Structure formats: C-alpha cells, structure tokens
C-alpha cells in the first residue's frame, strides 16, 4: 500500500508541474530553440547558395583562351588572314586506357557483349565539328583474353562514335601483346574507320598525311620508350616508331616532300605517373621538332595535364606545344588523373599567301566520374564546367557535393598549370 501511495503522490506532483507556469516556460524555451535552429539553418543554406552562385559565376567567367601569349602570337600571324581563308579544326584528347573495372562496367552478361557508349555520351558533342580528332590508344584491341592490356572491339567502336578519328598506337604499351597484337590492333582500328599512325610495319606508316579542305596535314607519331624494352628483340622494337632525331628528321623531310602544309607530331614522352613538371628531355625534343619545321606537338604519357606553350622557329613561324593532355579515359584514382582536357585548335589557311596559320586555341575540361561500384553505368566522362555550373546542392543533382568540390579544385588546378589567373574561390 505504501508503494502505491508514493506512486500516487508522484503522479500528482507531475500533474501539478504540467499545469503550472513551468510547463509553459519550458515549451516557450523549446519553441524558441527550434525557431533559432531553423533560422540558423536557413541562414546557412542561404549563405551556401550565395557562395555556390558566386563560384558558378566565376566558373562561367573563366576564359576559354589558354593564355595571353597565344593571343599575342596569333595576332601577329593573323595579319595574313583574309575573307577567303579556309578554317581547319583539330581536336586532341589524352591517353585512352581500358581497365578491368571499365570492362566490368561495360559487360552485359545476358548476351555476353560489351557496351562502352555510356562512358562517352556526355562528351561526344565536344569534338563533332572538328576535322581531325586525335588520341593515343594505350591498349591492344584483339580477340585475345580481355584485360587491362587488351580491349574488345566494342571499346574502339565507342571511341570512334565519340568523335575520335585518328589514333596513335606508339606508346610504352604498344607491344604488350607482341607484334601480332600490334598488327591486329591496327587492322581492327582501321576497320572501325580510324586513321592509324605510330607503327613501322610499312615504310610509309611513320607519316600519315590527311587531306582536309584541299590542305595537307601531316601527322607523325613516336614513343620515347617501350615497357620491358631490354627484353625485346630488334624486330619487335623496329615495329614501333621509337623516337630519335635521325628518325624524326627523315619523317619531317618525307612529309615536306609529299607536300605537307602543316606538320603535327604526337609523342609519348615525359615522366610516368602524376607529374605536372615538363622534363628537360621533353623540352629538348620539343626544341628539335620546332627547329625542324614542326607546327604542332601533342604530348602524352604523364597521367595529368602539363603546361602548354608557344615557340617560334628560326624562320619566325609559330609552333604550339601541349606537353601532356592527361588521360582521356581511365580509372586511375588520383584526382589529377581524373581531370583532363579536350584541346581545340583552329587553323586558317590564308587566302593571301596560301600558308596555314594557328588562329585560335581553347579547351574543354573533362572529368572521369565514378558513380560507385555496382552502379549501372558506373564510369562517365563529364564536361567539368557544365556539370559544375548546373549543380544546385539538391538531392536531384547527378553529382554529390564532394564531386562538385573536386570539379572546382580541378578547374583551379588546370588554370594554374595552363597559366590562367582567374581561379574559383
């Protein structure tokens, strides 16, 4: 009975407390706290929206022109430009890799087929107006077992459908599947409609001359090294265009003899891995090419973007050098490797003197998006600026806040590397 009386007294005290002024005070305090919290949250959201809008405005305002030095050089050469000029557009992408993760993402177990098209759908419009779109393929394309050194023909088909139409096969992985793999890769690429350069299986393969709008554009391609080169025989080494001054000079002279009006070199060089620094060897090779009449140099191998510059040869002609465009497509995990660019170059053939001049250079930053293991369409290339400026912070966004921050950081990194001083805060 005593326990029941204690319970009754306790319940009575609780009822008295709940009907007292204390209850209303507590409710008022809780309501005030809730209102303050809501206000703080709204203020923070408003500030975040303002900061996001400011960032996106800065991204939109970023200049597409790579740096002022180009404008100054182009302005000098454009004195020969006239209304009767012909415009020739060239685009270039970085190294093209196919990893085991990409194979898994593209595989359809229902019919044992592969489809890589979703990886390129967001960027295929970036190069569809260019006459020549070039890249370096760092995998074989054969009927052998598929792995990170050998991709199915569907991979090459997706690359071709994305707009790339000229492939260099000169790189450190050229002989990962031997000479037979190199030859089969070239045959498969040509069947898909690619112009292929970089091997030396025929005397004329060192130089490809593309006729564009009644103009002859020569493309030369080299690698400065091969994997396990010390274990390869002479026949294997001679099957790939290995860079040497003697070899390059012969090819340049051949191109000029064949009437080339503009000479482009694709070269696999520089330090391996994430290296933004241009090596002394790269600079020496670039100087050699420029002094021997090369107009455009597109570099690859370093897994990130490297600086770009203009040089003039002894005749005063302008040469443009992109030391590395990074990796066009890969599953490398470093943010520097995920951030790359599509380089766009406009040439103009003068109606006054018939020479081809560098008229304009710009670029589109792209990013390899990983949507996560197990996701359908796991890997996708995306336009960094368009994706970043479309981000709202809502759940409906395609990307997360973390990816958005990575895009902003990547754009700033590209600006720093390319010499642009308008970073996003």
Image: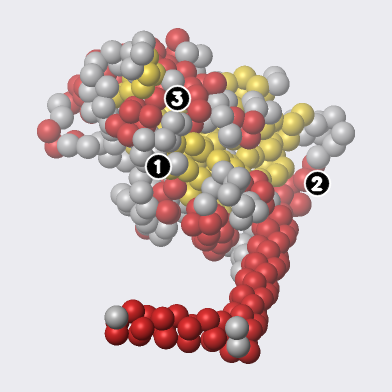
Query: For the point 52% across and 30% down, which residue is it?
Result: 120
Q: Residue furthest right?
A: 83
The percent position of residue 325, horizontal first and vertical second, equals 48, 45
- Residue 174 falls in which quadrant of the image? top left
Q: Nearer the viewer, residue 163 or 1?
A: 1
Against 207, residue 6 (above or below) is below
Query: For the point 65% across and 27% down, which residue is it?
Result: 128
> Which mark, by number, is residue 116?
3
In this picture, residue 15 sits left or right of residue 5: right
| One can see residue 282 in this view | no
In this picture, residue 354 sits left or right of residue 237: right
Query: For the point 35% across and 85% down, which residue is it?
Result: 6
Q: Residue furthest front?
A: 1
Q: Nearer the viewer, residue 66 or 246?
A: 66
Against 42, residue 9 (above or below) is below
In this picture, residue 148 sits left or right of residue 422: left
Residue highlighted by disc 1:
372
Q: Residue furthest left?
A: 231
**Which is closer to the viewer, label 1 or label 3?**
1
> Which mark, by number, is residue 272?
none
Quadrant position of the C terminus in the picture: bottom right
Of helix, strand and loop, which one carries label 2? helix
Of helix, strand and loop, which one carries label 1? loop
Residue highlighted by disc 2:
79
Q: How far is disc 1 from disc 3 in space, using C-alphas?
A: 16 Å
Of helix, strand and loop, which one carries label 3? loop
Q: Specify which label sits upstream in the sequence, 1 or 3.
A: 3
């Amino acid at each position: 009975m005593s326990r029941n009386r204690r319970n009754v007294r306790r319940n009575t005290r609780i009822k008295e407390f709940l009907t007292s002024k204390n209850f209303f005070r507590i409710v008022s305090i809780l309501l005030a706290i809730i209102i303050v919290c809501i206000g703080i949250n709204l203020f923070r959201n408003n500030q975040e929206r303002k900061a996001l809008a400011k960032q996106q405005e800065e991204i939109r305002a970023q200049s597409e022109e790579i740096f002022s030095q180009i404008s100054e050089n182009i302005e000098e050469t454009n004195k020969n430009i006239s209304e009767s000029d012909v415009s020739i557009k060239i685009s270039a992408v970085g190294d093209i890799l196919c990893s085991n993760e990409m194979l898994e993402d593209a595989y359809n177990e229902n019919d044992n087929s592969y489809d890589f098209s979703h990886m390129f759908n967001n960027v295929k419009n970036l190069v569809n107006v260019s006459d020549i779109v070039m890249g370096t393929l760092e995998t074989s394309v054969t009927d052998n077992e598929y792995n990170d050194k050998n991709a199915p023909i569907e991979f090459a088909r997706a690359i071709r459908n994305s707009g790339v139409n000229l492939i260099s096969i000169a790189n450190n992985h050229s002989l990962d599947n031997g000479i037979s793999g190199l030859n089969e890769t070239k045959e498969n690429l040509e069947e898909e409609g690619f112009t292929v350069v970089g091997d030396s299986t025929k005397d004329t393969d060192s130089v490809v001359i593309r006729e564009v709008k009644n103009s002859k554009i020569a493309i030369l391609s080299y690698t400065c090294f091969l994997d396990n080169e010390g274990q390869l025989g002479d026949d294997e080494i001679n099957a790939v265009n290995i860079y040497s001054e003697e070899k390059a000079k012969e090819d340049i002279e051949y191109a000029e003899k064949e009437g080339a009006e503009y000479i482009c070199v694709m070269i696999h060089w520089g330090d391996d891995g994430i290296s933004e620094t241009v090596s002394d060897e790269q600079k020496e090779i670039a100087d050699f090419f420029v002094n021997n009449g090369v107009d455009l140099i597109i570099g690859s191998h370093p897994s990130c973007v490297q600086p770009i510059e203009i040089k003039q040869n002894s005749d005063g002609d302008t040469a443009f050098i992109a030391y590395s465009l990074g990796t066009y497509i890969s599953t490398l995990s470093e943010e520097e490797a995920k951030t790359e660019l599509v380089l766009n170059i406009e040439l103009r053939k003068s109606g006054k003197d018939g020479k081809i001049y560098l008229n304009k250079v710009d670029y589109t930053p792209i990013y390899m998006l990983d949507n996560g293991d197990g996701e359908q369409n796991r890997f996708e290339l995306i336009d960094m600026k368009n994706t970043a400026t479309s981000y709202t912070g809502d759940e409906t966004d395609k990307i997360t806040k973390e990816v958005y921050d990575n895009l902003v950081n990547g754009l700033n990194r590209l600006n720093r590397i390319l010499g642009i001083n308008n970073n996003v805060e």
